[in-house]
Amino acid sequence: MFIMLTKGRHMNDFDRENIEHLLTCSNNEFNEWANAMDTDTLLYTIKLIQQAKIELALEELKLIDSLESESVSQEALIEANAVLSRFTLKG
């Protein structure tokens, strides 16, 4: 199967599907694709892969930030419970 990537400023769903195909296709399919493409398509594909790498790195940072925020929230909750326990009536 031969795939041409859409040319544009940002990846769209079609571009993402093409990257997924390139990452999961057989060696024969990849070789067929690589042998049939021109220089412009190769350069565009490299840029597209770089964009995907940036998007994955940003997603990773969001996940790390989310985990850190959750960790801070957990620490604040533990501290708040410790403070409240000092003022809890013992029965």
Image (cartoon, helix red, strand yellow):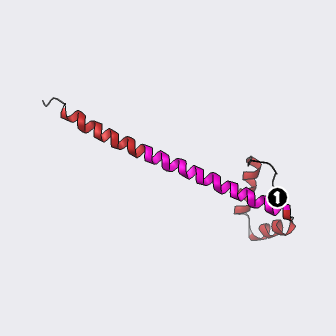
In the rendered view, does 2 fall on the left or right side of 62?
A: right
Instruction: Locate residue 11, reporting x and y percent.
Output: 73, 49
The quarter of the rendered structure image containing the N terminus is: bottom right
The quarter of the rendered structure image containing the C terminus is: top left
Instruction: Locate residue 22, reporting x and y percent.
Output: 74, 61
Residue indicated by mark 1: 3
Q: Main secondary structure of the magenta part?
A: helix
Q: Is residue 1 visible?
A: no
Instruction: Locate residue 35, reporting x and y percent.
Output: 85, 69
Q: Amino acid at mark 1?
A: Ile
For disc 1, the neighbor class at 10 Å (few under 14, some 14 to 19, many from 20) is some
Q: Is residue 74 visible?
A: yes
Residue found at x 80% / y 70%: 31
Magenta stretch holds residue 54: yes
In the rendered structure, which segment of residues is drawn in magenta? 40-69
Residue found at x 75% / y 70%: 27
> Helix, strand, or loop for circle 1?
loop
In the rendered view, does 60 fall on the left or right side of 21?
A: left
Q: Is residue 43 above or below residue 11?
A: below
* Near-viewer residue (17 or 45): 45
* Near-viewer residue (47 or 70): 47
Instruction: Locate residue 76, reporting x and y percent.
Output: 34, 40
Residue found at x 81% / y 67%: 34
Magenta stretch holds residue 30: no
In the rendered view, does 26 fall on the left or right side of 88?
A: right
* Near-viewer residue (19 or 86): 86
